[in-house]
Every structure is written in structure tokens, then in C-alpha cells.
Amino acid sequence: MSRTKACLPEGSRISDYLSVGLIAKIYPLARVRAALAATGRESERQRELPAHVMVYYSIALALYMQSSYREVLRCLLEGVQWLSGSDAPLLVAGNSGISQARTRLGVAPMRHLHDEFVGPIAVAGTRGAWWRTWRVVSLDGSTLDIADEQANVERFGRPGASRGQSAYPKLRFVSVVESGTHVLFGTQAASYATGENTLAQDVLGAGALRSGMLCLADRGFFGFLMWQRALATGAALLWRVKQNLRLPCERRLPDGSYRSRIYATDTDRRHQRDAIVVRVIEYTLDGVAGAEPIYRLITSLLDHEAAPAGELAALYQQRWEIETAFDELKTHLRGARIVLRSKTPELVLQEFYGLLMAHFAVRSLMHEAALKADIDSDQLSFLHAVRVIRRKMPILLAIPPSAA
């Protein structure tokens, strides 16, 4: 049988046919272009590296953190090399051209796409995502090392060290994780000097929590105003608090928990005004090495029959799921002891949102696989999933944006 040489339609460019396969499945091209239009970052003229290509490129950078800029672009283009109809090597843009294209893109489209797409994905059949009728999520923060450039130091700052300053400036961020899928969403980022509680208020203000969720958080986040603001989202709360917090027992319940009240100020407490009623759960972990003498939780779930204290105490351990998600992001995806490579604050944030979007894409595919196999996604290896995507991306058939 004779074969017809594959070639590009007249007037087409290789970059028009760029597809990152699995990533494009999560972030369809039409929605990417809509985000570019909404943020005013559409390409004004035909370029070899147009804006929509650079969106996918920014996400792909997170999948190939140990590769050079040019090598990542080459990886994306190899999937369409057969379309050229010749054995000539692909002309891959140089570092300067890539950097200019990234600068033209900026951070706004990436943030827009992150906020539009990255969110809870668990469905009724998702194992490990629900406790009774509530979707379990956790709130916490972390940091990332970024390139040691003066502009980055001025924008993000760096922590102190025992001898001077740390080696790299850092970006601080706070996220919510969907415990059953390890999806990080509602993320807010700022300088290292910005406190986690300040960023947590931004997370709440951006609408990350909502009715039907049960949010877990560590004792560092508790405060009357923070609790009040989190309650206003409609989510149920289960937060650890410090042992010295004044929580007098007003009514002991059959499951061992008790009702109490919290106040904004001591003056409000003295006058018994503007209180918020909470339920207190205190427990110990007998026989566990390194356990603290007592653990203290407060919850907005006041009905001990609908939310038994023993079940809530056991559920609180799922707060550590967010630490696992951070480890996936910082160790398995980014790579251990690797800093974000961007040399300007704008591109640092672009790279950061690309990293979050890549993590979401991997976790979305793992969730899909877990549903098909009817298993908990915790049984699947995140690192293995990343390795599969890295192997498959260069050989996936690329299709033009207008194709079905």
C-alpha cells in the first residue's frame, strides 16, 4: 500500500499544531484563549510562540523542572515533528525568545485559568473524599525557594538564618486541599514576610470554602475573627486550638464533648456579648510515641448525634493530607532541592501558577483512574503518574486547534 507523505497545510506553522495532550484535556484550548482575551494578553500578531502556546508551555515547565527551557519546548514539539514531512531538525526557539514570550504572557492569564479550573473534583463515588455528608478539606500554608535574583529578593524577601540570611528568597502560599483527591485549590501567594493568617483571610475572601465542606485547620490559624469569617462561608469547621484557650464547659454532652463560647475580646467575655457557640472535643493518643498530653479541637457542628466526638477526633488526622499534597508539589513534581527558575517576580508567579495547574492536571487524571478502578486515589502513586505523563507527552498525536 502506498503512503502519502504527511505535511502541514499551506501557511500553517508548527506552533499552531502544538498540543500537550493530557494537559490540554484538562485545560481546553478554547478556554485558554478565552482567558487570554479576558486578561488582554492575546497575541496581537502571528508569532512562532503565541500566547496560547506559552500557557501550555508554562504548565509543562512544572513537569520538566530539571530540563532547560529549550528542552521543555523541544519535548512539546517532538509530538508533531512527523507533520513536517522531512528529517530536518525542529527549529526550537532560543532562551531569549522563550523568555520574551513568557514576559509577554505575564501572570494574569495563568492566575485567571487557575482560579477558573482548579477546584474540588470529588464526586459522590470518590472514595475517601467524604465524611458523612461533608466534603473534607484542610487549610494550611507552605513556602517555595525561588531564584536568587535581586528583583525576587526585593519582591518576596528571604528568611533569616543563624548566620546572616538563607540562601534563597522564598514565596509563601496558603491553600485548601480536598482530602480525598489531594487537589490544592483557592491558593493565595505573597512575600515571605506575609503571615499565613493574612493569606488565609485572602483564601476565605476568594470563596475557597463553601457550604457542604468540612474544613480542618491547625491551631495556628485559630482566632475569633478568622473563625467568624470562616463560618460566614457556610462551611462546617473542625480546628485544633491551643490548650490555654479559655473554653469553660457550659454543657457536657453524652459523647464527652461539651458546649462553650468564644469571644473577640476580654471585654466582650466579661459582658457576655457577641459570643459564638462552639463544641469542644478533648482527647489523648495513648500508646503513640511523641504524642502530646492532650489534643483540643473546636467545631461548629454542635449536634453530638450528627457528629460524634470520637469520629471527629479520628477525622482530624486527615488534616495531614495537605502535607502530603505539599510534598507532591514540592518534592515529586518540582523536585527536591530545586528552586523555581524564573528571574523576575512576574515570571516567578507565572511559574508558580503553572506548577499548581500541573499538579491539578496530574491529580485530575489520577482521580479519573481511581473512579474507573473503584479504588481510593491514595492507592495510586503520584510520582508514577508524573513519570507516565512525562513519557507520554512528547509522543501524543498533536492536532490543530480547530480539529475535533
Image (spheres, rainbow, N blue to C red):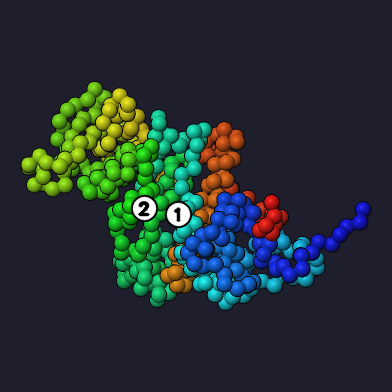
- Asked if residue 167 shows in the view, the reply is no
Disc 1 crowd rating (10 Å Cα; few below 14, some 14-19, many 20+) is some
Numbered circles on residues, count: 2
Mark closest to the chain's N terminus, 2 or 1: 1
Q: Amino acid at mark 1?
A: Asp
Q: CA distance from mark 2 to mark 1?
A: 9 Å
Q: Is residue 215 above or below residue 168?
A: above
Residue furthest out toward the right: 1
The residue tagged with tag 1: helix, strand or loop? helix
* Residue, disc 1: 115
Q: Is residue 20 above or below residue 13?
A: above
Residue furthest out toward the left: 271
Q: Nearer the viewer, residue 47 or 54?
A: 47
Q: What residue is drawn where x is 77% and y is 62%?
A: 82
Residue 286 position in % (x across, y down): 31, 32
Disc 2 crowd rating (10 Å Cα; few below 14, some 14-19, many 20+) is few
Q: Which disc is residue 32 wearing?
A: none
Residue 200 position in % (x across, y down): 32, 53
Q: Amino acid at mark 2?
A: Ala
- Asked if residue 266 shows in the view, the reply is yes
Q: What residue is drawn where x is 18% and y is 34%?
A: 260
* Residue, disc 2: 206
Q: What residue is drawn where x is 60% and y is 57%?
A: 29
Q: What residue is drawn where x is 57% and y is 67%?
A: 51
Image position of 164 (left or right of 2): left
The residue tagged with tag 2: helix, strand or loop? loop
Q: Nearer the viewer, residue 295 or 60?
A: 60
Residue 234 position in % (x across, y down): 32, 40
Q: Are marks 2 and 1 in contact (CB under 8 Å)?
A: yes
